[in-house]
Image (cartoon, grey):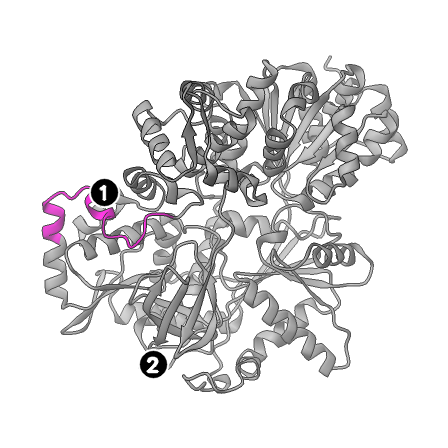
Amino acid sequence: MTTPAFELLSQSIQHCLWRMNWTELRPIQSESIRAILQTEDDIIVSAATASGKTEAAFLPIISHIDSNRRNSIQALCISPLKALINDQFRRLDDLSEYAEIPVHRWHGDVGQDKKAKLVKNPGGVLLLTPESLESLFINRTSALERMFANLEFVVIDELHAFVGRERGTHMKSLLKRLEQRIKHSYRIVALSATLGDWPKKYAEWLRPKSPDSVLIIEDKAASRTVRLKIYGYPNEHLRKSTAADGNQDQATDLEVEFAEVLSDLQVCFNGRHGLIFANSRNNVEWFADALNHRNEADGLPRSYLVHHGSVSKHVREETEDLMRGEIPFTTLCSSSLELGIDIGDVQIVGQLGAPWSVNSLIQRLGRSGRRGDRGSEIRIFITELPGPKKDAELIDRLHIELIQAIALVELMLEKWLEPPEIAPFDPSTFVQQIMSVLAETGGIRASAIYSRLVESGTFADFTKSQFASILRSLHDHGIVQQMDEGDLILGLKGEQIVKSFEFYSAFMSAKELKVVHGGKHVGSISGLMPPQESDHILLAGRRWQVVHVDDRTSTIEVTPAKGRKAAKFNPSGGFIDDKVFEKMRQVLLSDKSYAYLSNGAAIWLCEARAAATEANLGTRSWIELTPQTCLLFPWCGTRTMITIGLLARSIGLACTNRDGIAIEFKNGFADVRARLRDLVKYEPTPHNIAEHASNHAFRKYDEFLPNDIVENSFISNVMNFRRAIEILEMI
């Protein structure tokens, strides 16, 4: 007979659960308890938000520590956000206090006295971010072995937030280096709400040499009712012209144009605990201000808060506290609240504009309905200005953002998720870790760095010749220098970088590009993937065409372009998958109706389908606009679209990315098609094409790398050459 999972826990933890009035363990918690306490496997626990994943990991881990106490930190938990660490600290407080097992936090808001106390007398559980673990290597070098001498468990919270990103590579490298320092391995327990059909890929990312040894525990039985609605606003009478020179009061103008959007937001969110996600911080601030202004005009309290990375720690924490209170507030936020921070009983989630991925949509939807049995609820508001007239451009008549939102919802209902990138080529983070090792050791042979970071470390895809080339480049930039005895040390520039607080993070802080027209500041957009000259961007309620990009001053000069859309900014979440655009094409070309569309959104969908039928998009991908211009609809993801643009530019074709859905060429259809077909016949290489990108550097330390390695990184991470060639072969 199988021993009940509860009986496997230590007596202290059992008593604590009784005191907390737990009547039963959830199935995923029981399964995790058995796996952690009765096997030696690494484990991935996959379950929906608020399904008890944190307790599934820590009930057995703290129970094990309670029965096997050692004089060091025994469990290390790595989270992507300080706020998540604080949340976990609160949730583990009762468990740890009753069992008399210390739980510590280590981040910038924790006092030095508490940190010094932990270093002097380490034990229990430590919660931190990858950046804080990096700081331990740099600033507490001599204490590392003693602090982690008996480390047994590493818990990775929100696994999906690390995989395929610089922070994930950074974290894995630090954990490998820690393993080398303490001279023994540890078990990994990873937690995630969204793995989709890819749990084996995540296991391969965790343990590349032994993915089959990772036990996957999935809560497949858990399901919630989902209430969802997508809103559109085709009322023509709301349209109001805005002077192109920007002299009118834009805030007032937009409040008129978004009057119906604001009214629906008030109806849905006034008097409820809610979250509203926006695709830019600018929209977070604008809509929060507009909603509070409307509430005040109606004699209602200001009930809309803001939360994003640019507001102070004090404001963010005050917002989190208010959300946990009894008075109903709604917070407008960027992705800062997408992960599982406990901010109370969120009843409803809003999304301004289409999300950029199914993964993000599921994460945001999962923030609601965490308590009780009422299910999750999300309302998606397509903030495009009122529908275009019949003589408007085809792009505007297709209502691309609505089609994208529908496609993402349909893929979510089909239970499809974007596949993770488990082996990204990341030379920038490699550079950061080389500097980190030099700061940790004070000086070391190149061969020893290669052994730590490549042969026994995370960067196994780098060859010795690439490593040597990177070291030469770092020497040329003053990052490293070689002593007469042969040891490498940090150079003057390297020392300056390591001393900066920003060194602890391997990723680049979100760079903002200033957008100007006629010498006046229009707004800012993300610099993650800057537009090129002639590209169109959407900003401050209208479409602009890029005239000039000044990398030196991070400024983009624009001029008004044809068409107008909502105050939407280029998304900084990431690249949109090819599968999303394939589904968008299906949505446009089918006659399927969607019960979750508002009347306005349904009207827009009909308009979009009528425009697609009129343009014969079901049978052709080329649209001839004039004898000198044409559009290509390749129905492909962001990386593929970028690559097609570079392929075109490589043969002198002037082209513009139109809203991420089409490419506009400044040549006649027959000429463009013939030249692209000839290009494919000559079998270009990715390197031939990458040369035509304005800038290959897109990560934090790319500027210190050899040109060929930066180009390889650009090809690997930004381009999708194979898919782009496949599309051009079919046109």
The three-letter code of the residue at mark 2 reads Lys
Pick the front one: 344 or 429: 429
Report which quarter residue 47 is drawn in.
Answer: top right
Residue 40, percent from left and from top: 62, 15
In this rendering, does residue 155 appear at all? yes
Q: Quadrant of the C terminus?
A: bottom left
Residue 153 to residue 655: above or below: above
Comparing marks 1 and 2, which lies closer to the viewer?
1
Residue placed under numbered mark 2 in the picture: 390
Give me the residue at 43% from left, 20% from top.
Answer: 445
Residue 195 located left or right of residue 685? right
Residue 451 located left or right of residue 68? left
Mark 1 or mark 2: whose residue is earlier in sequence: 2
Label 2: how many Cα within 10 Å (few below 14, some 14–19, many 20+)? few
Residue 547 to residue 153: above or below: below
Label 2: element kind: loop
Q: Magenta residues, as a range?
A: 677-697
Give me the residue at 43% from left, 64% from top.
Answer: 401
Residue placed under numbered mark 1 in the picture: 686
Which residue is outermost to the front? 484
Pick the front one: 109 or 476: 476
Pick the front one: 430 or 103: 430
Whole-Å distance between the Cαs marked 1 and 2? 41 Å
Pick the front one: 387 or 695: 695
Residue 127 located left or right of residue 498? right
Q: Quadrant of the N terminus?
A: top right
Residue 623, percent from left and from top: 21, 67
Label 1: how many Cα within 10 Å (few below 14, some 14–19, many 20+)? many
Residue 704, percent from left and from top: 38, 41
Residue 127 to residue 697: above or below: above
